Amino acid sequence: MWGDSTPHLLVWLPLSLTSTSHCGLTPFIQEKKTLEDWPQSSQAEEMSTIRSFEGFQPVSLKQEGDDQAFETDHLSAKEEDPDTLSGLRQISRLPSMTGSSLCPNPYHRPYSSRKYFVTRPGTIETAMEDLKGHIAKTSGETIQGFWLLTEIDHWNNEKERILLVTDKTLLICKYDFIMLSCVQLQRIPLSAVYRICLGKFSFPGMSLDKRQGEGLRIYWGSPEQQSLLSRWNPWSTEVPYATFTEHPVKYTSEKFIEICKLSGFTCKLIPAIRNAHKNSTGCEGGKGLIVLTEPILIETYTGLMSFIGNRNKLGYALARGSIGF
């Protein structure tokens, strides 16, 4: 029985047959020693092809080898220099500078503003040229400035608007920045404006949709004379005032800082209104205009419609797919 296995034992352990035992346990022990010696001979021969490739090293297949490799990766604190360990701890505790160094300047964040069609190259310039041509053909008035602002209606809905101030008229334009065409143009005589309010927005105590920030409200009629139907109609065009705030794309470039600045629009509007009052027959010296600094009240209570519309920017021309605005 053992004669068949003798040549194999001579290959692995040439001295394995020098001792014999009558109980038959010695061959078993000798075979066990042969298996233990397997990584030293046969494994070296089979891994010779792997060693021929650069970057490869033979790895032990023993189960306890994984634990040994893991332990060698993490050196014990007893074998390391205390100064080295303290230096590594200090480095690991340093805060990450990635977040603060990504966008230190608002002008370096173009991706969030590219979804607004008004920021596309040549879009706002085309809108200005269209409105200049329209005014030249219809009234021939002198344009004193263009502004891109956000109108807030009496239901707290945001709407993207272009404002023009001439020597006689304030024009509020709803412009389609996708099709590059004027959709709606509202003309307000400057001589009819009698009050301007500047201040922060305020809401009733139970309002669910409140906004922060400051705005400008222009009155050319009395709110007390507004009908109940127009007050509770979100699409009413008979509201005798208009409320504006700065456009979200104000800080995308130097150009939009100028045309989206609410203070710049106010500085041009007030003198134009005073001059229009002075030239009109009803008021002299611009005494008919009242400029107040007080909170701007927006009477919305539930505000569900404005909450959905403003959160999704439905009042702006955005790259949103097939959803209208």
Image (spheres, rainbow, N blue to C red):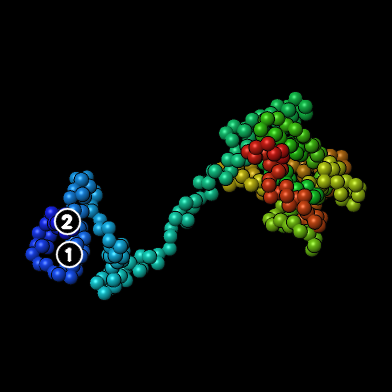
Disc 1: CA contacts within 10 A as few (<14), some (14-19) or many (>=20): some
Q: 223 or 232: nearer the eye?
A: 232
Q: Which residue is mark 2?
A: 5
Q: Amino acid at mark 1?
A: Pro
Q: Residue furthest top?
A: 137
In the depicted structure, whether residue 295 falls above or below residue 149: below
Q: Amino acid at mark 2?
A: Ser
Q: 108 or 17: nearer the eye?
A: 17
Secondary structure under the numbered disc 2 in the rendered image: loop
Spatial separation of the CA atoms under disc 2 and disc 1: 10 Å
Which numbered disc flags the more N-terminal residue, 2 or 1? 2
Whether residue 73 is visible, yes or no, is: no
- The quadrant the C terminus occupies is top right
Q: Residue at x 71, y 56 (%)?
A: 211
Secondary structure under the numbered disc 1 in the rendered image: helix
Q: Residue at x 43, y 63 (%)?
A: 95
- The quadrant the N terminus occupies is bottom left
Instruction: Classify residue 62 as left or right of residue 2.
Output: right
> For residue 83, what is the image quadrant?
bottom left
The label on residue 278 is none
Q: Position of residue 66 (x, y in %)?
A: 31, 62
Whether residue 43 is visible, yes or no, is: yes
Instruction: Classify residue 92 as left or right of residue 112.
Output: left
Q: Residue at x 17, y 64 (%)?
A: 27
Q: Position of residue 38 (x, y in %)?
A: 20, 58
The label on residue 27 is 1
> For residue 292, what is the image quadrant?
bottom right
Q: Residue at x 68, y 30 (%)?
A: 179
Tags 2 and 1 touching, CB below 8 Å = yes
Q: Position of residue 228 (x, y in %)?
A: 91, 49
> For residue 182, what is the image quadrant?
top right
